[in-house]
Amino acid sequence: MNKSVGYLKAASLVALIASCNAALAKDLGVIGKSYPIIERDLVEVIHERIQQKTESGELDAMHEGMRDRSKGYARRPPGVSLPRAQEYRAVEINPLYTLDRDITDADGKVLFTAGTQVNPLEVNPLTKVLCFIDGDDPAQVDWLQAYCAKDIRNKMILVSGDFLAVTEQIGMRLYFDQRGYLVERFGIQAVPAVIRQSGKVLYVEEFPIK
């Protein structure tokens, strides 16, 4: 009798599990609109967008803008605005410095000990004059040609102005002190100015134009 009851309970449990599975497996239909899952190739998407921008003319406009910005940068690099010198000013710069550590070669041999004083001008002297002007000031451009252009060793440097126009005007190679790196390093306060070596020191000189 007990066995019959046990079999009955087991059969009931199996029937219950079967009915639950059937309920879970029932097709409930579609809830809302369904869409197929499509993963587009990234390269295809990029090509499509480029084609769209090309057809609309947007790509050509972007290229034109980039060319204009490049031309503008070449003509007027980022510089600094300095006043015209009103009086002569000369400042001595002593580049002597003291080593704070030993300088060794590849094999670890000490070449210079900490505490050694070094003057770079004794190793690599400045054999030319560095001339700085504002290229937007015609008087300074004339000064540059009269004062610096006679010696081809001199370096003529704009701190601001139309680089291409001044280059064409004087017909010589020019440099541009972008963002005023040299101006700040040597403490130039007005232009035209020059940097030259005298003995073991450098001099920064600012010249008034009459």
Image (cartoon, helix red, strand yellow):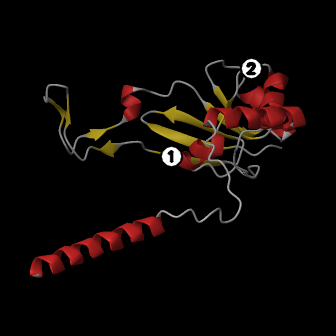
State the residue lying farthest toward the right: 56
> Which residue is at a point 69% across and 45% down the rendered structure image?
79
Give how far apart the Cα atoms at labels 1 and 2 are: 29 Å
| 151 lies above or below 86 | above
Q: Is residue 97 left or right of residue 181?
A: left
Quarter the N terminus occupies: bottom left
State the residue lying farthest toward the front: 1
Q: Is residue 145 left or right of residue 41?
A: right
Please indicate, yes or no, whether residue 61 appears anywhere in the rendered image: yes
Coordinates of residue 52 in the picture (x, y in percent): 82, 36
Coordinates of residue 76 in the picture (x, y in percent): 77, 38
> Which residue is at a point 33% across and 71% down the rendered structure image?
15
Q: Is residue 160 left or right of residue 195?
A: right
Please indicate, yes or no, whether residue 59 appears anywhere in the rendered image: no
Which circle marks residue 127 in the picture?
Answer: none
Coordinates of residue 17 in the picture (x, y in percent): 34, 70
Q: Amino acid at mark 1?
A: Glu
Q: Under tag 2, what secondary structure? A: loop
Residue 114 falls in image quadrant:
top left
> Which residue is at a point 78% across and 25% down the rendered structure image?
167
Residue identified by numbered label 1: 92
> Which residue is at a point 59% across and 47% down the rendered structure image?
90
Residue 172 falls in image quadrant:
top right
Q: Nearer the viewer, residue 48 or 164?
A: 48
Residue identified by numbered label 2: 172
| 155 lies above or below 135 | above
Coordinates of residue 60 in the picture (x, y in percent): 85, 32
Depth check, mark 1 against mark 2: the one in front is 2
Q: Under tag 1, what secondary structure? A: strand
